[in-house]
Every structure is written in C-alpha cells, then in structure tokens.
Image (spheres, rainbow, N blue to C red):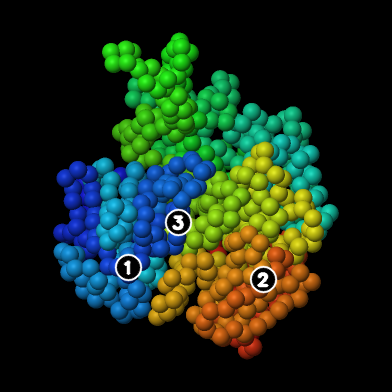
Amino acid sequence: MIQKYVFGTPFETEAVIAVLPAAQGLPAYGTIALESGFSFSYTMAEDDIVYGLGEANRGINKRGYCYISNCTDDPEHLEDKRSFYGAHNFLILAGQDAHRSGDIQAVPTDQTAPGSKKNFGLFIDYPGKLTFDIGYTRQDLLTISCAETDLYLYVIDGESPYDIVKQFRQIIGRSYIPPMFAFGYGQSRWGYRDQKDLRQVADGYRKNHLPIDMIYMDIDYMDRYKDFTVSPERFDDFKAFVREMKEHDIHLIPIIDAGIKIEPGDPVYEEGLQKGFFCQKEDGTPFVAAVWPGYTHFTDFLDKDARAWFGSNYRFLTDMGIEGFWNDMNEPAIFYTPEGAENVKALMQRALDQEDLDADWDAGQEEKVTVGQLQAAFKGLANHPADYASFYHKVNGRLIRHDKVHNLYGYNMTRAAGEAFKTISPHKRILLFSRSSYIGMHRYGGIWMGDNKSWWSHLLLNIKMLPSLNMCGFLYTGADLGGFGADTTRDLLLRWLALGVFTPLMRNHSAFGTREQECYQFEKLEDFRHVLSVRYRLIPYLYSEYMKAALDNDLYFKPLAFVYPDDKMALQVEDQLMLGNESMIAPIYTQNACGRYVYLPEEMKFIKFLPDGTLSEEILDKGHHYVEIALNEVPLFIRKGCCIPVAKAAESVAALDREHLELLGYEGAPYRLYEDDGICTDPQTQGRYRILR
C-alpha cells in the first residue's frame, strides 16, 4: 500500500508517474516537524536495516552514516563523502524479523517504542538539498530533513523490503531499455584525440581478438569542446569514419556536456540565446560559468521548450550514424564564475601586497590574508553554493532559483535526449546514460557511477552500489572498470573486469595522464581475452534477465536478504549479489587474493569459466566455503534447481549465435529466455519468450 502526503506546494519533478490521491493526516510512521523546514524522525530498533539511496557511499545497509542528496561533481570518493553525482531519495526501513512475507505488524503511531516488526519505504520527492541522518548523530535515530516544507512524501507499506521495491518501481515507471549492442564491452579514455587514436584502439582489440562493441569519445572529439560539433582537424570525414567503425562492429559513443559555449556566430549558441533557452540571473541576463569550452551558458532543462530544442541537436550526430551517447558535467559542474574569479583575484592581490602570509595579526590592524584563506578560496571556486543560488529556471511562467531544484538538472538533460530520440529514432533504441541523475531519469537512460579511482576499495563500493541503484529504477549501470583516476594495475583491472562481466554497462574508462589501461596494454593478454569472452558467452542470459527486470519492474541485482529472508546470515552479506533469478556473484576485491570466502544460503553449483574455454563445476552445500579463484578465472554460482543459457564466444554482439545455446546448471532445470531483435522500441509486444531445458 502506498500513501502520498503533500506538504506545502511541492515542485512537480515528475519522478512519480502514477496518479495517487493525497492521504489525510500524518503518516503512521515517524514524527514530522515543520517549524524550520521539513523534518521526519523515526526511532530505529537495534537490528533495523536501511536499504536504498541509490548512488550513495558505504554499504548496502545505509545505517550508521549521514548522506546528503545534492548532486555533486566531486571525484574524491572517500568514506567521508556524503554527496555523489546522483540524488535518489528512496529508502526502506526493515527489521531483521520483518524481511519475511507476512511478518508485518501494526506499528504504534507515536513511534516511541522501537523493535516492532515492520517494513516501510519512504520516497521524499524534493529536488533540493536533502539530508539523511541514519543513526549518525544518534545510533537509534533516523532523521530526514531539508530547508523547505514543500514536498511530497510517499510512504509504502509492504510484506517485505523486496515487495516495497516492486511497489515503488511500479509508480515511478519502467526502466530504460538500451539496444543489445550496449551489453557488449566498451573501451573509453579521456585523451583519445582524433580518428588515428580511435582507429588504434579498434585495431588493438580486433587484431588481438579481444571482444569489443563500443569505443567512447570524450571531449577531445569536439571542435574546441563545443557540444554538437566535431573537430574538422581531427576528423576529416566523421560520417565516413563512423561507417568504417561499424563495418568492424564497433559503435562510437560521443560525450555531450551540459554547457553551451558563448561564441557569437555559433549556430547552437545563437539559437539558444535568441530563443531564451538558457538559465538566467535575477536581472534577466544569461548566467555565465566556465566549464571545458571556457565561458558557457547552461540550457534551462526545466523549460520543456528548451528541453525539446537541446534534444533536437543530437540529430547532428545521429545523422552521421551515431547510435549512443553519454551525458556528462550535468550536475551541473561549474569550474568557476566571473564573480568567483574576481573575488579570488582580489584576495590574491591583497596577499601579494602583504609582506608575509602569517596567520596571526595584531588587534586593530587590517585582517591579513592567510595561506588557509587562499587555499579555501581556490578550492571553493568550483561548484560553489553561492553560484548555484545565483541563477534561475523558467517554469510555467515563473522563475525558480536553481539551488531549490538543483538535483533535477542532469535528470532533465538526459530526459531532453530521451524524448528527442522518440522523434529522431522512432523505431530503434539509442544508447544513453548520464553522470548526474534523480529518480525519474531512469525512464530515459542509465547512469555510470562517476569518476572513481583505481582503488580496490572502489571495486567493493561498486558492488555495494549496484542493488541500491536497481531499487531506484537504474538498471543500466556500471562503474569505470579499472578505475578512472589514478593508475590501475593488471590484477585490479582483471578483477574489476570479472565483476564487469555481469554489470549491464561494461566500460573500461580512464583519465588523461593516467596509465593506459586498454586490455592489450598488459602482458598475457590472453587472460583479458578470456574474461571478455565470458561476458559475450553470457549476454543471452544477462540480456534476458535485464529485460525481465525492466518489463516486470523487478531487480537485476538483489541483496541476498531479498531472496533469502529467513536466513539471518544472508542479511549481513554485502559483497555477494543475486543476479536475476538463477545466479549469484561473489567477486574478488582484494589485492593478491587467490580466492575468497563465500556464504551460500542454499546448495549451489559453483562454476568457474577457465582460461582454456572449459568449465569447472562443483556442487557446494549451504554454508561457508573458501573458494579458489585464479586471476584469469570468472566465478559464478547457480542456484539449486536452476540453469542459465550461454552462447559460444564471439568478438561482437552482432557475431553472437543466440539461437544455439548451451545450458549450465542443474540437469533438467528449465530457463525462460526473453528474446527480441535488440533494437525494437516496444519490447513488451515485440519480444518473445521460449523455455529452454
């Protein structure tokens, strides 16, 4: 059961598409205070578990820390970070005894006595900064707060956390479905400058028989970093080059950034300016911020006409044969504003006029500039809160200050593209994913998990984010395999690829100035060939499970507790995930490991894809096991009584034989396979199912 509570005058985010009546009174759970903004508080029992929040730090169980929904361009994903690129305000509170279906009981409305068996979900539909204090200030207290009292609060009662997720997914709409080629492997790097670089990458994979379907183009392909342009110096005939790559079954996937360069004479800039499609300052002049092209304007994506205009510009690239995009810098990221730069300039001049930068000064003297002030000023130039509070959106004839709706920007940028593709490509799916997001964007595209680092800890964080993102509707997701920032290592990349074998988005991406991490850059590249080949062998299964999850508002990745609610040990496991309905993954995420401990909630068949193309199979009983997994092996566990389909290895999705499949698992077990042509825009009616046994 879902109840919708209305406080004040909420901004219509369109995250929820179901029409629900407003409930009367206050929710049965928690205490709500409206004296200074909105505050929801709830006293948690000692064993309560909190799921959700999508792209957030730390574990699958979010209890014990403070998280802030405030889309933030910050690549330093350390344990103390409270905001990432997305804002996903959905969580589930569940007692350990309440995971089981039918175990729900009535809960006192005053919520003063913790420990009752319960499951309830909360979605706070609020587009500004929102804080989730989940046992951080006080271990037993959940507090959700924001500065305004204008929001929708959805309270979801369910028989189990899994049931609550399904109800929530029903009201927010079906998840984005990419083309089948998007389940292939992709290689990316910030630093591929021209067609020579891209051709070299394609040759490196194809000549070494390393499977690949996509090569991503970062900002260097553009003409001076301008959206909807291609550098004529670096690509003498871009359309022909796109066609050349497709002849090798490789799709080029360009980046699109949020800022439009201020350049008189440029047709995109001139049209956007003339039609008033850019965000503006309070005085009515367009807002200016520096990003990659220099000074830019930001398209007002909350204006439906501006959204339609921006989306129509993708045709410039689709007309050249492009069939996929990744949207970036759409928090929106701000390097600095003219006002911010002037302030720092003035501070620096004062510092230069001083004899020293001593932190102390005598009373009565003019305050000296200190080293700390200079450091803070330079660090605060980018993404400064004052800048986000200085520009506005036009919504239904009125101005809305950006910081009040900040978390909707990336969502609506990707929505602009997704809506445009219905006209640009009405009969064929386009690959689309984004960095910044809000719930609702999952209907238009996927997300990647942002600018991570080549750290083992980020591989583990990747694992823990996956089910939480699925709960919020984001099924097409994955991390930058091998790590974006810092230098990767051979073993880290192989282990991360072994996880990426199972994530819908499988992309190796690295930053300019870091170690080159294409698979052919390392010794014994046959190990990389094998791991990538396993991905392609599994695509029929992975695609089938993805489509079933999307069409049924289900999860692709689940915590073990969702499948084994009676198993108290399963509630504690956070480094193993259920995939679809038949299998479990348990990646290795530690340096120099030869294997790992796993917990099996039931008997399972342990399968390893071996580097010679064969398999090892072993039935393991319920309980704890240590399993050996070499660096060039890919492990998978198949549930008792289940099987999965696998294809023969191929070097591209187009080359896969999806008709003649082998089944792995328990003898005689059936598998319900979903199939379609991989591009149809109405898979609900154009897809088909067949039973394999």
The amino acid sitting under disc 3 is: Arg
* Rendered residue at 59%/34% (across/down): 227
Callout 1 secondary element: loop
Q: Which residue is mark 3?
A: 58
The amino acid sitting under disc 2 is: Ile
Question: Which image quadrant for residue 591?
Answer: bottom right
**Above-or-below relation of 555 to 279:** below
* Rendered residue at 21%/71% (across/down): 107
The answer for how far apart the CA atoms under marks 1 and 2 are is 34 Å
* Rendered residue at 52%/84% (across/down): 622
The answer for how far apart the CA atoms under marks 1 and 3 are is 17 Å
- Mark nearer the N terminus (1 vs 3): 1
- Mark nearer the N terminus (3 vs 2): 3
Q: Which residue is mark 1?
A: 48
Question: Which image quadrant for residue 496?
Answer: bottom right
Q: Residues within 10 Å of mark 3 (few under 14, many from 20)?
A: many
Callout 3 secondary element: loop
